[in-house]
Image (cartoon, helix red, strand yellow):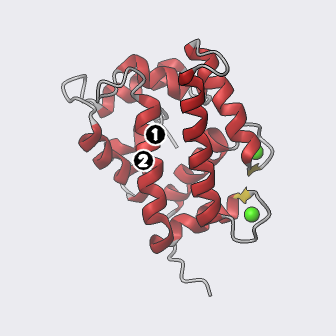
Amino acid sequence: MDNATPISDFRQKKLIFIFENFFDVNHSGSIERKDFDQAVDYICGRRGWEKDSNKYNDTRERFIQIWDALRCVADANTDDQVSQEEWCRLWRTPSDCESWQNTYQSFMFYLLDTSGDGSIDVDEFTSVCSTYGVSPDECRGAYKKLSKDGTVKVDKPYYSVLWKDFFFSDDTAALGNFIFGKINF
Ligand SMILES: [Ca+2]
Ligand SMILES: [Ca+2]
């Protein structure tokens, strides 16, 4: 039984962007464990965290947790891959995506707040988002918008508001559309 609700073209575009850039790292057309292994190596490599260091292992553990959480809610045909269709269906089914998106949101904040001081600055934001294929200039422009020219601190409560806009709003002008560094969809 499919109790999914429809989503707008604009939301769909945002979701596909996340699927293609932030999850399907090896561009195989589906999300699988290998994507997460590759992402850990990229992220830790850029940060100078060596394999088997505490930071590497902590990051790796969190990536694997997010994969397990995603697989549990989205992999409907249990083939250990999350297809684009399964991914979009997840977001059309509010009851399924609520706990998943809380987990995912905490994970993204952890990933972005590299220094761990409780807020995301422009360099942290640019470093992570550009790892996933958005140009550094675009990332800086996106950060400028969502931080209202640096006047608003991007801490967890504010990030949480932006997050809801990204995943659930059809408003093309919502500031939350920029939280993954991309300005135009
Ligand atoms: Ca893949
Ligand atoms: Ca699947």
**Number of disc labels:** 2
Residue 130 picture quarter: top right
Does the numbered disc 1 mark a residue whose Cβ is under 8 Å from ligand 1? no
What is the CA distance from the residue labelled 2 to the residue labelled 1? 5 Å
| Label 1 crowd bin: few (<14), some (14–19), many (20+), radius 10 Å | some
Residue 49, label in figure: none
Residue at figure coordinates x 40%, y 24% from the top left: 141
Residue at figure coordinates x 69%, y 58% from the top left: 84
Q: Quadrant of ligand 2?
A: bottom right
Q: Residue 93 in the image: x percent, y percent?
A: 51, 72
Local SS, label 1: helix
C-beta proximity under 8 Å, tags 2 and 1:
yes
Residue 108, label in figure: 1
Residue occupying the far bottom of the picture: 1
Q: Nearer the viewer, residue 145 or 75?
A: 75
What amino acid type is highlighted by mark number 2?
Answer: Gln
Say if residue 179 shows up in the picture: no
What amino acid type is highlighted by mark number 1?
Answer: Met
Q: Residue 4 in the image: x percent, y percent?
A: 54, 78
Residue 78 picture quarter: bottom right
163 w.r.t. 87: above or below:
above
Residue at figure coordinates x 65%, y 22% from the top left: 52
Quadrant containing the N terminus in the rendered view? bottom right
66 w.r.t. 96: above or below:
above
Residue at figure coordinates x 51%, y 19% from the top left: 136
